Every structure is written in C-alpha cells, then in structure tokens.
Image: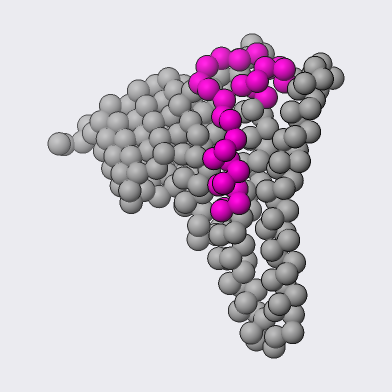
Amino acid sequence: MKFSSMNPWTWVKFWVYLFYTGFTYMLPVAFSYYYFIWIYSRSLFVSFWLFAFYLLILLPLVTSISMGFFLRITPKPREGEYMANMNNKNFFRAIMLGGIYKPYYRLFTYSPIFSHMAKILGAKVGKETYVSGKITEPYLFEIGNNSFVGGDATINTHSFENNRMILKKVKVGNNSLIGAHSLIMPGVEIGDNVVVAAKSFVPKNRKLPSNTIWAGIPAKRIKREKK
C-alpha cells in the first residue's frame, strides 16, 4: 500500500476523510471545553462527581451519537477481494473507516456503553447480547439474541493475502458464547448454542454447527451439547 501511487481523485477523497474524521472528534472536544468551563466554578467535591459523570457517561454518550451519525451516512466497502491499493474504492473505504473505528474502541473500552459500541458502529446485534471484544469492521458482523463476545476477543472480518484484502462477514447465532481472547477469522459462521472456549482460534470460512463446543488453536470440536 503506497500513498505515493494514489491518483489525484483518491488524494481528494483522502483529505475529505481526514477532515470528516477530525470533525467527528472535534464535536466531543468542543462539548468538553464548554462543560469544563461550566464545572470550573463549582466546589471541589461537586466538580469531582461532575467530572466522573462526564468521563464515564456524558463523553461516551455525546461521542457515540456523533460517531454513529457520521458512520451511518458513510459509504461502506462490500464483501469481496480487493487489491491493496488506495485507488481501489473498497480498499480505500475499509482503511479510512478503520482509522475512525480504532480510537473509539480504545477510548471506551472501560466505559459502560462499550458493550453497545458494536451496534453504534454498524453491527447487527440481537436482543440481550453483550459484545465486549473488538470487531475490525462492525458493518460486516452479525450476532443473534442472548449471545456473548468475551473481553479482548477479536472478530476479524478482513485478511491480507498476496497483496489483496479479503473482506467477509462473520455471523454468530443465538445463545452462543465466544470466549475471552479468542480470534475469529473472516467468513466464519457460528450456529446457535455454540461455545468457543477462551483463547481459541477459528480459521477463516469455518462453519461451526449449532449445539457444539469448540476449543484450541485451531479450534476443534470437543463436545456435542444435548438438545
């Protein structure tokens, strides 16, 4: 991937994305500035609790609203294989959107709204589902009802092979668990009532049938659940 090989139109889009990203960050920053001016004159005790409320609740809420709105109207790359070249529109979109997602994941890892970040950023998330892991491209991730993605698990919906970028959806069914620190690769489909044990690796395009348990590197089926 060489920036020097980008054509003039790609350079224009590049700077538009940078401005666009900067604007989404500046809204919360501007809000923070005026909020701090407001609490500055308060007592030390009141200021402490106002700051805690701001850091844990208000800032994530304002930022997620800003981020969610802009990402909803931004064109997303499609599933497929693309040359790792910034002149390719799908590759360009994937790289630029990734640059927007990552800071938000890191910023809100320990925030109460973190479990909702996947949905805010475009993933299809079912009811009573908790996502505390990282998703590289949330718009390529689907998960059903009553499921759980453990802490520091990674849902990787892209890979690079022979100077090509592969984008492919990852789907998880209902009542399924992806253990902490697991790595799920592109194209994986996980059925209902499936358990992927902690620190497991599920290779790309693997299909895990319903009512099964998987563990290991690479993940292997170790038990069949009773229906």
* Residue farthest right in this picture: 4
Q: Position of residue 207 (x, y in %)?
A: 35, 23
Q: Position of residue 40 (x, y in %)?
A: 74, 80
Name the one closer to the observer, 171 or 26.
Answer: 26
Q: Position of residue 143 (x, y in %)?
A: 38, 38
User: Would you say residue 196 sits in the magenta stretch?
Assistant: no
Q: Position of residue 42 (x, y in %)?
A: 70, 85
Quarter the C terminus occupies: top left
Q: How is the image coloured?
A: one colour
Q: Is residue 9 above or below residue 130?
A: above
- Whether residue 194 is visible to the viewer of this picture, yes or no, is no
Quarter the N terminus occupies: top right
- Whether residue 103 is visible to the viewer of this picture, yes or no, is yes
Name the one closer to the observer, 21 or 98.
Answer: 21
* Residue farthest top in this picture: 162
- Residue positioned 76% across, 41% down in the render: 19
User: Would you say residue 86 sits in the magenta stretch?
Assistant: yes
Q: Is residue 157 above or below residue 6?
A: below
- Looking at the rendering, the stretch of residues picked out in magenta corresponds to 64-92
- Residue positioned 75% across, 38% down in the render: 18
Q: Is residue 70 above or below residue 10?
A: below
Query: Residue 153 vs residue 86: left or right?
Result: left
- Residue positioned 65% across, 86% down in the render: 45
- Residue positioned 39% across, 21% down in the render: 206
Q: Is residue 43 above or below residue 195?
A: below
Query: Residue 6 vs residue 206: left or right?
Result: right
**Residue 34 placement: quadrant:** bottom right
